[in-house]
Image (cartoon, rainbow, N blue to C red):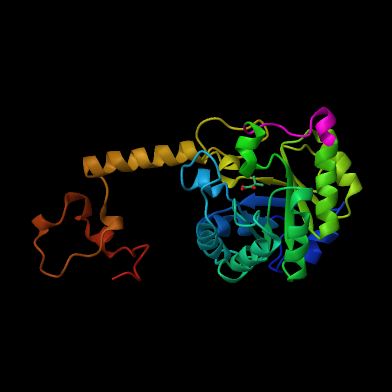
Amino acid sequence: MYGSTSSTSKKVTVPDLRARKGGEKIAMVTAYDYTMARLADEAGVDMILVGDSLGMVVQGLTTTIPVTLDEMAYHCRAVARGLGRAHLVGDLPFMSYQVSPAQAVESAGKLMKDGACESVKLEGGEEVAEHVHRIVRAGIAVVGHVGLTPQSVHALGGFKVQGRGSEADRVVEGALALEQAGAFAIVLEAIPPDVASRITALLSVPTIGIGAGAGCDGQVLVSTDLLGLSRGHQPKFAKRFANLGEQAIAAMATYVDEVRSGAFPAAAHTYKPNAGTSERSVPAAARSADDLDAPLALDHWH
Ligand code: KIV
């Protein structure tokens, strides 16, 4: 197990996360499948977000706009199976909540029932406060999201820093409206650090920053960015904590070489031949009697 010292198997709850306000920082990452969810959970991550960033990360899109509620529910379900401790947040995708508070409640309910989520996240400030209020009244915990809201990428004119100069007040007021509506945590994306610190000081619920500086109550990163699996342009805030992309390419290139040369599969990766099989029908690499008797890693597969 790779758990940090604060990691225990006790499930992280919404009240636990609220209680972290101003205390131990909350670590959140995105995950889109069972395998990544398990790794993050074992690492001691507190919150897993199945972000609609899966549009870019999993589907190869350029924006999150086409992602559907059914796709989100599918990925949330897979992620949920990988979690023991971390709290699971599902993102409500574009046009699954903006239409009306009633639509927002229905969509949030679907992520809880079909996606096994423990809370939902949606983008926007004052304009979605009523939606948040209604979801919370239905007994569903909500994470807000202000600053750069990628579902509005075209209206914003691109993936740009928000809340500069006189725009700061609009972001602050949006965060306050979400807290008032009942959000239990708020993501602050791509805003100047002074604005994020101001919001963090004003709110009684935790702020979780991404490109919002060190003054937030927690941080969130896209898992493929932090692991070095993403290709192309990286935002300034996306620190790489590993270079797994390079390692994956090197490993696959070695595999390609070994398949072509016949070095793979060797005896260690080959089942015993049937009794009486002629020596000549077994590849040279598998002909050592010792190797054939060695236990196979997957010997429960017949
Ligand atoms: O979709 C996503 O991954 C997100 C995070 C970047 C906060 O919303």
Q: Is residue 252 left or right of residue 278?
A: right
Observer-nearest of 221 and 151 = 151
Looking at the image, residue 83 lies above or below residue 43: below
Say which residue appears at 16% left-offset and 52% top-offset.
283
Magenta span includes 159: yes
Residue 254: x percent and y percent?
34, 39
Say which residue appears at 74% left-offset and 34% top-offset.
162
Residue 96 sits in quarter: bottom right
Magenta span includes 2: no
Residue 243: x percent and y percent?
54, 37
Observer-nearest of 66 and 202 = 66
Residue lying at the far front of the rendered structure: 99
Residue 3: x percent and y percent?
66, 57
Q: Is residue 94 left or right of residue 290?
A: right
Looking at the image, residue 216 lies above or below residue 31: above
Say which residue appears at 28% left-offset and 71% top-offset.
302
Question: If the image is split into quadrants, where does the N terminus sit?
Answer: bottom right
Q: Main secondary structure of the magenta part?
A: loop
Residue 120: x percent and y percent?
67, 60
Q: Is residue 220 visible?
A: yes
Observer-nearest of 241 and 207 = 207
**What stretch of residues is rendered in magenta?**
158-168
Residue lying at the far right of the rendered structure: 202
Observer-nearest of 224 and 10 = 224
Q: In this figure, what is the number of numbered marks?
A: 0
Q: Is residue 86 visible?
A: no
